[in-house]
Amino acid sequence: MAVQINNFRRLLRTVEALSELGPELTGEQEFSETSRRMLSAIIEAAGAREGALFLFSEKPTALTSAAAQGFALLPEPSFIPLLPKHVHALTAARGPIVLNPSTYSVFLSSNGNVAPELFRCLAPLKATGKLAGVVALGRRPGDAIYEDADLDAMGLLCSYVALAVHNHTLTQTVAQRVSENLRLMASLHGFYDNALEAFATAIDVKHVNIHGHSLRVGRYAAAIGDAMGMESGEVAALRSAGYLHDIGKVAVDRRLFGKPSALDPEEFREMADHTVVGHQIVSSVQFPWPKIPEIVRWHHERSDGSGYPDALAADELPMPVRIVGLADTFDAMTSTRPYRQPYSVGAALSELVRMAPQKYDPNVVHGLLIQMRRDAIGSNRTPLLADRMTVNIAASDIDHLAATLQHKVSHGKLYLT
C-alpha cells in the first residue's frame, strides 16, 4: 500500500511539473531560463539531487550543457565529444538509462571536460526520430538507485522537453544560416560595389566631360532611394544600376561625346542605341539584383512616353527605372557639356519640378529634393554633391519647390471624405 501511495504521489508530482512546464515551453522567455526551469522540473520529478541538460550538435558531434543544477564541480559549459557509436546508442535508447561502470563508454565519451562517472542516469531527448539533447542526472538522496517509477516520470517529462530543445535548435540553426547569408551578401555586395565602381570609371573614360558621371548617378540614385524609404538591398541595387546604366556607351564612337553642336538624326540614333547595347551586355550577367537589365535599357524613358528606346509610359516604368532616369538627368544638367554650361543646383531642381509629373515621377523628384535640403542644411553625413559644386539654393527655397511640386500633383483633384 505504501508503494502505491508513493507511486501516486510521484505521478501527481509529474503532472504538476507538466502543468508548470506548459507555459514555459510555449513562452517568449530566453531559452537559458527555460532550460533551467525544465531541468529543475525533471530533477524534482525523478527525485534527484543534481542534473544537467545537454544540447546535441552535429558539427562538431558533441553534447554541450545548457543548464546544470546541484553539482559541486561542473564546468560551464560542460562539453562531451561523441563518437558515432555514442550517437547511435543514445538515439536507439527507448527511454531513460541507468548507468553503471560497464555502460558509461557505450553512451558517453571521456574526452570532454566532464567525467561521465558523475552521472547515474541518462535520458536521451529525441524529436522526429533524431537526437536533440540529453538530460543527465547525478546522485539521489542517500545514493538511492533510480527505480522504474522514477524513470517513467523522467521519461514523460523528457518527451516534452525534447520538443522544446528541438525547436530551439531549429531556431538557432535558422538564425545562424540567416546571419551567414547576410555576411555573405554583405561581402558579395562589397565585392560588386568595388568591381562596378571600376566598370563605371571605365565606361566614362570616353570623354573628359563625362568623367565620374556613372559613379555620381549611382550615388544619386541610392540617395533618392534612401530618401524614399527603400530597404538597404534596394538602395544597393540602385547604386549598382546607376554605375552600369551607361555601359552601352562603350560601343559609341568617341567623337560624338565631344561634338559641340546638336547631333544629327543618324548620330542621335547611334547614341540612343547605347541603351539597347547595354541591355544586351548586362542581360548575360547574373547579378544579385534582377532589375539591372531593364534599368540599363529604360533609363531614358519618360513618363509621357517621349523617351527611348521603347517609348514606355509612366505606368510601364518600374520605380528603380524612374529613379535612375532622374539621377541621370540631374547629373547631366549639372555637368558641363560641349554645347552648354552646367545648370546650377537651384536651376536644375526648378527645371525638374517644372517637368514633373509629365516627364518625371514626382515622388522621385521629391526624394531628390529631400537629399538636396539635407545638403543645404549640412545634415547629410556624406554630402550628396561631395564638394563637386556649391549648393546655391537655400533650404527655404527647396521647401518652396517641394510645395510647388505637391500643388502640381494634387491640383484639380477631388478628394472624397
Image (cartoon, rainbow, N blue to C red):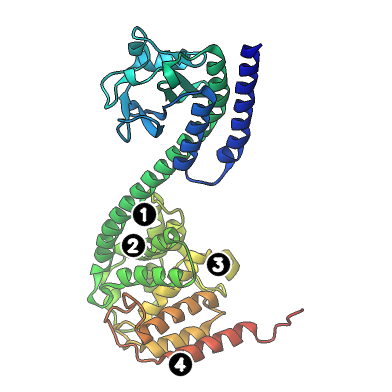
Q: CA distance from mark 1 to mark 2?
A: 8 Å
- Label 3, label 2: how far apart the Cα atoms are: 21 Å
Q: Does 410 appear above or below 250?
A: below
Residue shown at 41% from the left, 86% from the top: 348
Q: Which residue is mark 2?
A: 247
| Residue type, mark 3 in image | Leu
Mark 2 residue type: Ile
Under mark 1, the amino acid is: Ile
Q: Give the farthest residue toward the top.
A: 102
Residue tagged by mark 1?
281
Q: Earlier in the sequence, mark 3 or mark 2?
A: 2
Please give the residue where the numbered disc 4 appears in the rendered image. 396
Q: Position of residue 318 (x, y in %)?
A: 53, 63
How far apart in space, not on screen, are marks 4 and 2 (Cα)?
A: 38 Å
Considering depth in this image, is 170 or 281 the residue closer to the camera?
Answer: 170
Residue to which mark 3 is pinned = 312
Choose mark 4 or mark 2, whichever is in front: 4
Residue at image location 46% in from the left, 88% down from the top = 398
**Residue at image point 46% right, 37% down:** 36
Circle 2 sits in a helix, a strand or a loop, which is it?
A: helix
- Image side of residue 168 versus residue 156, left or right: left
Badge 1 marks a residue whose secondary structure is helix
